[in-house]
Amino acid sequence: METKEGIKFNIEQERHKLHKMKQRYRDFNHPKVLGQSIVLDELINQYNRFLKENKPIA
């Protein structure tokens, strides 16, 4: 199981890749940029699920 910090690290790595791809292809609609955006979206969703599932009991 991933840790909160591990997921955050992966998000930052993939965000950096997305930024580099945007610079390289100069278009958010390029298939590779869109694919990387999907990867990042999935990690953000994973992070949000992790937070929801590990919410402390009040």
Image: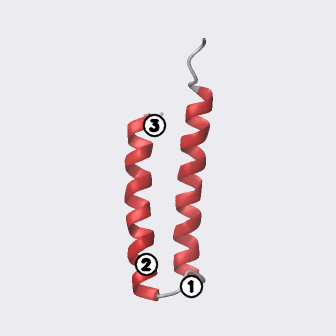
Q: Secondary structure at mark 3?
A: loop
- Residue 34 placement (x, y as % from top left): 58, 75
Amino acid type of the residue tagged 2 in the rendering? Met
Residue 19 falls left or right of residue 28 = left
Residue 53 found in image quarter: top right
N-terminal of the two: label 3 or label 1?
Answer: 3
Q: Residues within 10 Å of mark 2 (few under 14, many from 20)?
A: some
Q: Secondary structure at mark 2?
A: helix
Which residue is identified by label 2? 21
Closer to us: 11 or 2: 11
Q: In terms of sequence position, does the residue under pointer 2 or pointer 3 come before the other?
A: 3
The crowding category of the residue bearing disc 3, from other C-alpha atoms within 10 Å (few below 14, some 14 to 19, many at least 20), is few
Q: Quadrant of the C terminus?
A: top right
Residue in view at x 42 percent, y 72 percent:
19
Q: Residue at x 40, y 85 (%)?
A: 24
Residue receiving disc 1 = 30
Kindly identify the residue that appears in the image at 56 percent across and 80 percent down: 28
**Contact check, label 2 and label 3, Cβ < 8 Å:** no
Residue 56 vs residue 14, the one in the foreground = 56
Q: Is residue 21 above or below residue 11?
A: below
* Image quadrant where residue 42 sits: bottom right
- SS for callout 1: loop
Are the residues tagged 2 and 1 within 8 Å (C-beta)? Answer: yes
Checking the image for residue 2, the label placed there is 3
> Residue 31 placed where, x, y %?
58, 82
Left or right of 40? Residue 23 is left
Which residue type does callout 1 highlight? His
* Image colouring: secondary structure
